[in-house]
């Protein structure tokens, strides 16, 4: 079974530029998550989708970050314009059903973003 | 709201020694607790999880953790460290009622020396 796929793996941009990350979850997984992991910290949930609907985006900086999951499969996370503090690893995860508390989340390898 | 505290950002052990990584949680409702491992340049992989079935939870690669409600702890142990155990370990918590996001600790880097 293929795992969660993410691209690109690395990205370097200058501040005020825009960037997009792509995630393809495990086949059949209804719930998709985007996390931000800043160096030295644990992952922080940015947004959670169930199928193509948003369940939680309370920690997404909506003035510059946007995400979509059209057709309820793969997803794109965009930052526009980027700031220095956006330098982090962006992790995508998926889970099989509704994202209930005990459900295991499966993580992709992440996209490492450096904003100069 | 839930939170976890991982004591020690770095833990060093010798190969063959006991591994003990500490995690204390805070939750106003019964929690679900998780340990994830992250190898360099990789995503997180589930080691084990507590979902209220049994307080002693066994995971992959010889790791186990014990849920102690009285101490609000969920420490991760392994009897004998291997060089391949060197990685970053994250404790995480969520609630077992309704929808709650998974909240991670700041992580503990395990260093294993020969």
Image (tube, coloured by chain):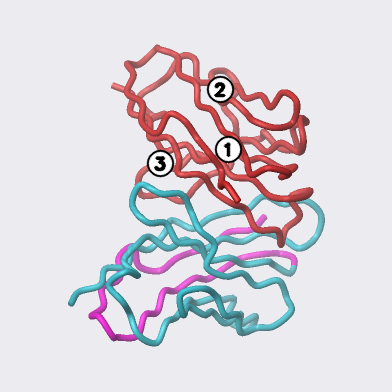
Residue A65: which disc? 2
Callout in the foreground (3, 1): 1
Question: A110 and A17: which one is in front?
Answer: A110
Write down the residue under mark 1: A34
Mark 1 → mark 2, Cα distance in angstroms: 11 Å
In this rendered view, identify the residue nearer to me: B57 or B66. B57
Residue A104: in magenta span: no
**Whole-percent x, y for residue B59 in the image:** 55, 75
Please tell me whether residue A19 is drawn above or below residue A74 in the rendered image. above
Q: What element carries label 1?
A: strand
Crowd class of label 3 (few under 14; some 14 to 19; many from 20; radius 10 Å): some
Which chain is red in the picture? A
Q: Which badge, 3 or 2, comes first in the chain's sequence?
A: 3
Tell me the residue at 67%/55% (across/down). B1
Q: Residue at x 75, y 42 (%)?
A: A30
Relative height, residue B105 to residue A87 (above, below): below
């Amino acid at each position: 079974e293929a795992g969660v796929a993410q691209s690109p793996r690395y990205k370097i941009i200058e501040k005020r530029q825009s960037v997009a990350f792509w995630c393809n979850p495990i086949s059949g997984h209804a719930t998709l998550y985007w996390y931000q992991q800043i160096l030295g910290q644990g992952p922080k949930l940015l947004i959670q989708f169930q199928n193509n609907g948003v369940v939680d985006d309370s920690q997404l900086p909506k003035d510059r970050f946007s995400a979509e999951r059209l057709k309820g499969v793969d997803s794109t996370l965009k930052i526009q314009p980027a700031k220095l503090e956006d330098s982090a690893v962006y992790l995508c995860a998926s889970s099989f059903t509704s994202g209930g508390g005990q459900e295991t989340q499966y993580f992709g390898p992440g996209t490492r973003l450096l904003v100069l | 709201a839930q939170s976890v505290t991982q004591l020690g950002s770095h833990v060093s052990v010798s190969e063959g020694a006991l591994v003990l990584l500490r995690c204390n949680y805070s939750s106003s409702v019964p929690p679900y607790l998780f340990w994830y491992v992250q190898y360099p340049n990789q995503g997180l992989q589930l080691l084990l999880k507590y979902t209220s079935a049994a307080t002693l939870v066994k995971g992959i690669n010889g790791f186990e953790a014990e849920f102690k409600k009285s101490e609000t702890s969920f420490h991760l142990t392994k009897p004998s460290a291997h060089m391949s155990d060197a990685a970053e370990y994250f404790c995480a918590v969520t609630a077992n009622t309704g929808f709650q996001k998974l909240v991670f600790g700041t992580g503990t880097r395990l260093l294993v020396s020969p």
